[in-house]
Amino acid sequence: MGWDLPGSTANTNVAASTAATGVIGGNMSNNVGLTANTASSARWAFSQFNQTGTNAIDFTNALAGNDSVAFSLSASSGYSLTVRGLGAFSAYRSGSGPKNLTLIYSTNPSFSTYSILATDANTGTNAVTTDFSTNAAWTNFATPIIIAEGTTGYFRVVGYGASATGGTLGIISGGTVDFSLNGDVNSLSLYTWTSGSGNWAVGTAANWQSGGASAAVSGGNLAVDAAGVTAGALSLSGSTPVTLTGGALTAASIIGTAGSSLKLNGAAATVSGNVDLTDATLSGGNLSLGGILGANISTGSATLSTAIGGAGSLSKSGAGELILSRTNTYSGTTSVGAGTLSTGANEILSDTATLTVSANATFKLGGNETVGGLNAIFGSFINLQGNTLTAGGNNSSFTNGA
């Protein structure tokens, strides 16, 4: 998203010159508190900055007095936007011009509420030109801005601390794009990948894009954008493993159908909801889990070699065996409802979480294990295999007839 700004002109409104699919660009304009200044052909400039101080109250007065440059952008139907920072932006401040520039964001054009994104202060008394494209605070916001489908985000660059109303602020012009925003365009439609290799990228129409949509995958290698990607529900199918490399995956849920597998391959994933694995597996990397990881292994055995953390729980069902081979730190309950849950080494489960084993289900040790509490229902089986199971890390251990 960018604007090609004029030089020496009294033009106070400039239409966006570039915009990605899904982005509706608004005009960039000076607010009514400022006057266009035509002294230089190398910049789009303004004067009449009225606040001489550089304190918070002076910023507030400058905002109320409309001593600012404003711009906006909207997410069109079927898309949401993530604004991560500014791209191109260089500004000239005369010796008597505004010493401080503050970038703010609001969800309403009146700016009755707003967030401060970045501030820059010129402590000298001479004219200065600042290239904000090299300033991390301006190019990489501490908290990215999310603009939902069909809504508009409003921005202002507020100037204050001028020693004279004739002092100027000028945005350097003359390039193809003189002022721009960086971020992601997120398609909200269903993503489908029918095997093979490709990129799960952001802002690239030919590839999967990051966003709040569901994603259906039937196998293949996906190179995740380094900045990470998001999906609503990730559905796995087919016998070909889905392998993710690169950045992190954030999803609302993961559903794995029979025979499918997800290889995080050293990457990290965050799932706010549930993970449902029906004769499916996870391997490699780390998963931060917010809900329940339900593993239904109907026959044979399957190995889960992803390290599970977070506040979630694990529930094993089905007559088959699930083997946990990595050290896990999730704080919720581990429940064995049917079949066998096995550990593949020492200390696989969290020392403070509760282990529950139902009647006719088995918990089998592949090494020494400590759990916070043990609830072994009458008729359940604990297969130590010569190892030691220590319970009571959370002072709530009890057994009921195992």
Image (tube, rainbow, N blue to C red):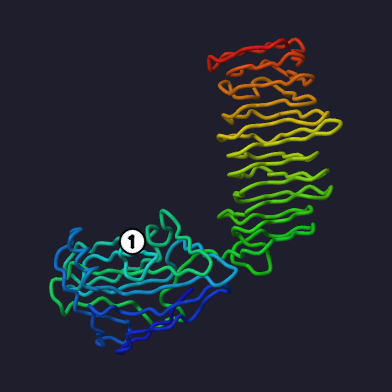
| Nearer to the camera, 302 or 204 | 302
Q: Is residue 171 above or below residue 182?
A: below
Farthest right residue?
300
* Camera-nearest residue between 8 and 195: 195
Residue 370 in the image, given as x and y percentages of width and height: 62, 17
> x%, y% of residue 226?
58, 54
Q: Is residue 104 left or right of residue 21?
A: left
* Residue for point 18% across, 70% down: 126
275 or 351, nearer to the observer: 275
Residue bearing the label numbered 1:
114
The image position of residue 356, as x and y in percent, is: 67, 21
Q: Position of residue 357 (x, y in %)?
A: 71, 20
Q: Amino acid at mark 1?
A: Tyr
Q: Is residue 265 above or below residue 375?
A: below
> Which residue is nearer to you in this view: 92 or 390?
390
Which image quarter holds the C terminus? top right
Total numbered circles: 1
Q: Is residue 54 above or below residue 398?
A: below
**Left or right: residue 312 compared with residue 88:** right
Q: Is residue 22 above or below residue 224?
A: below
Question: Relative to 377, is 286 on the left or the right?
Answer: left
Q: Mark 1 Cα within 10 Å, few/some/many (few <14, many 20+)? A: some
Residue at coordinates 60% horizontally, 55% vertically from top-left? 229
Quarter assignment of residue 373: top right
Q: Residue at x 31, y 89 (%)?
A: 9
In screen coordinates, is 331 left or right of 90? right
Quadrant location of residue 203?
bottom right
